[in-house]
Image (cartoon, helix red, strand yellow):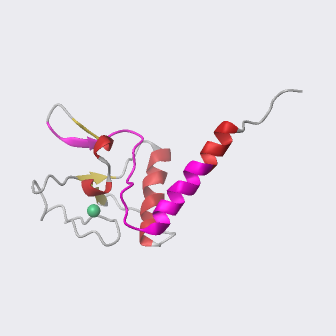
Amino acid sequence: MPNCVVKGCKNQSLKNKNQDGITFHTFPIRNKDIREKWIEVIRVSRNEPSWNPTVRSVVCSTRFEDDDFYNTNKGLRRVVRNEYPKVISNVSIILYLVINLKISFIIDIFPCSTDK
Ligand SMILES: [Zn+2]
């Protein structure tokens, strides 16, 4: 009975199955970059820098934004490629994401000059 791995989240896949529209999502396997991002978010949320997911680790759909999902032909809800858990009620995760976004923003607007 996997629990959502987000710290403080009480959603369980058995208890909440087909209830409240909550779905549970395993960590991406093939896309290493986005997998690392999922792990990083959960590590910050749990304040456990060396935390790692198991094959049974899941994150519930309440930790994603509505736009992060799509429905398959069979009616399964899946996480869009390149999306990751964002809705974490923890100040440090917000700071972490803001800092990351700011860094990439600064890099974008001040590209290294290649002129010689
Ligand atoms: Zn959860």
Residue at figure coordinates x 57%, y 53% from the top left: 100
Image quadrant in which the C terminus is located? top right
Quarter-wise, where is residue 53 in the image?
bottom left
Residue at figure coordinates x 14%, y 34% from the top left: 74
88 or 47: nearer the eye? 88
Q: Is residue 44 left or right of residue 69?
A: right
Image quadrant in which the N terminus is located? bottom left
Quarter-wise, where is residue 15 in the image?
bottom left
Residue at figure coordinates x 44%, y 50% from the top left: 35
Residue 78 position in % (x across, y down): 26, 42
* Residue 98 vertical placement versus 45 (above, below): above
Q: Is residue 2 magenta?
A: no
- Image region (quadrant) for ligand 1: bottom left
* Residue 104 vertical placement versus 49 (above, below): above
Q: Is residue 81 magenta?
A: yes
Q: Which residues are magenta?
A: 75-102
Judged from this view, the residue extending furthest toward the right is: 116
Q: Is residue 111 left or right of residue 48?
A: right
Residue 101 position in % (x across, y down): 55, 49
* Residue 8 vertical placement versus 31 (above, below): below
Residue 93 position in % (x across, y down): 47, 63
Q: Is residue 51 visible?
A: no
Judged from this view, the residue extending furthest toward the left is: 19
* Residue 24 vertical placement versus 110 (above, below): below
Residue 77 position in % (x across, y down): 21, 42
Residue at figure coordinates x 47%, y 52% from the top left: 37
Q: Is residue 49 visible?
A: yes
